[in-house]
Amino acid sequence: MKRRILTLLFALLATQLGSLISPAYACGCGAMIPYGQSRFGVDRETSVVRWDGRTEQIVMRFIVRGDADRAAWIMPVPGRATVQLGDGKLFDELEERTLPEHETRHYFWPRSKDWPFSSGMSDGVGAAPPGAGDAAVGVVGREQLGDFDVARLTATDPAALKNWLESNGFTLPDRLTTEVEPYVAQKWEYVAVRLAPREPGKKLRGELDPLRIRFDSDKLVYPMRLSRMAKNPQSLGLYVLAEHRMEPASRIGGAAPEVTFAGTVSPGSGPLAELAGGKPVFLTAIEQEFPEPARIDADHELRATAKDTPYRRIVYRDQLLTVGGGVPVWLLSVVAALLALAAAVVVIRRRRRARRS
């Protein structure tokens, strides 16, 4: 049984982007460990979090690459968790609902790609501001979900957790023991997921089935501390569904978080409606970059903003101002000015002749 449990300890809210190649001891959401010397990287990770003030749900989806046929993902959670498969259509719906608006901005004078400088028209784009066997480790549940073998664990000693994982065939860095200590001290539990395709010879590539994790929490938390082990810059993308617009309480060592969408959405029907409980909910989409993962010093805690101010990005298409059949307004203005100037010259000359006579 031990061989069929890999590990995963970390994940909670978000739409997240990041890439790692073996040894992949961390991804944007925590610890991702390939088996042996295999190569394994996360091209994209997207997280959706639903929080109603008492219960938190996280739906996570990975797009991976490499030659690994097994990997582990370790996720700490503040309470007893349940795990099931998620619906991939949820991400498609959220992506569509948060698309930026497209607007056209007209400009008067020709630019480098306009006539007479060029024969083409310009399109400028701008955006205005996703243990059995060790008494210190307990197995409280286990499920087989698609290609995932999921174990829910408790651990009273970080070294024992590390030893339990290694006894299942995974070599973990010594640093993991230190990084897990804060979670052990807070009596958090863990979701350990073994990513292993049941089809013989199949590799972990492409889009994996989403996982949906649920647990009780009186505050909205997104564990990020294990991400400090990452060797490459990390990028976090997060969809947050709550009663109000949400924001991270601090940067936790990363760049300033950027809101890419904020507004009330009416779910209708489908996976979003099911996650939202069939009622309107406020959706906040957040992106954040972590150029130096070692600077991450805490987990993300999200809080309600003072006002539920809506926001949507705008993508502008710059277009030369024209009239009629596409005649540039600037050209008509120049011609009109020249005609007016010529008329003025004629009038002045006639007046001078009249004075002489």
Image: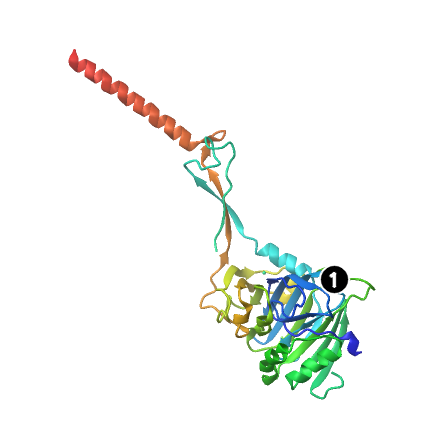
Q: Position of residue 253 (x, y in %)?
A: 50, 70
Dividing the image into 4 quarters, which one contains the N terminus? bottom right
Q: Amino acid at mark 1?
A: Asp
Q: SS class of the residue under badge 1?
A: loop
Q: Position of residue 94 (x, y in %)?
A: 61, 59
| Residue lying farthest to the top in this orientation | 357
| Residue lying farthest to the right in this orientation | 200
The residue lying toward the viewer, choosing from 239 and 32, is 32
The residue lying toward the viewer, choosing from 200 and 169, is 169
Dividing the image into 4 quarters, which one contains the C terminus? top left
Image quarter for residue 37?
bottom right
| Residue lying farthest to the front in this orientation | 37
- Left or right of 20? Residue 146 is right
Above or below, 164 against 290 in this view is below
| Residue lying farthest to the bottom in this orientation | 135
Q: Position of residue 7 (x, y in %)?
A: 71, 74
Q: Residue at x 48, y 53 (%)?
A: 128
Q: Residue at x 47, y 31 (%)?
A: 115
Above or below, 38 against 118 in this view is below
- Left or right of 258? Residue 143 is right
Q: Residues within 10 Å of mark 1 (few under 14, many from 20)?
A: some
- The answer to whether residue 276 of the structure is visible from this angle is yes
Q: Position of residue 19 (x, y in %)?
A: 63, 62
Image quarter for residue 333?
top left
How many numbered marks, from 0 up?
1
Report which residue position mark 1 lands on: 67
- Left or right of 45? Residue 325 is left
- Left or right of 89? Residue 258 is left
Above or below, 52 against 21 in this view is below
- The answer to whether residue 78 of the structure is visible from this angle is no
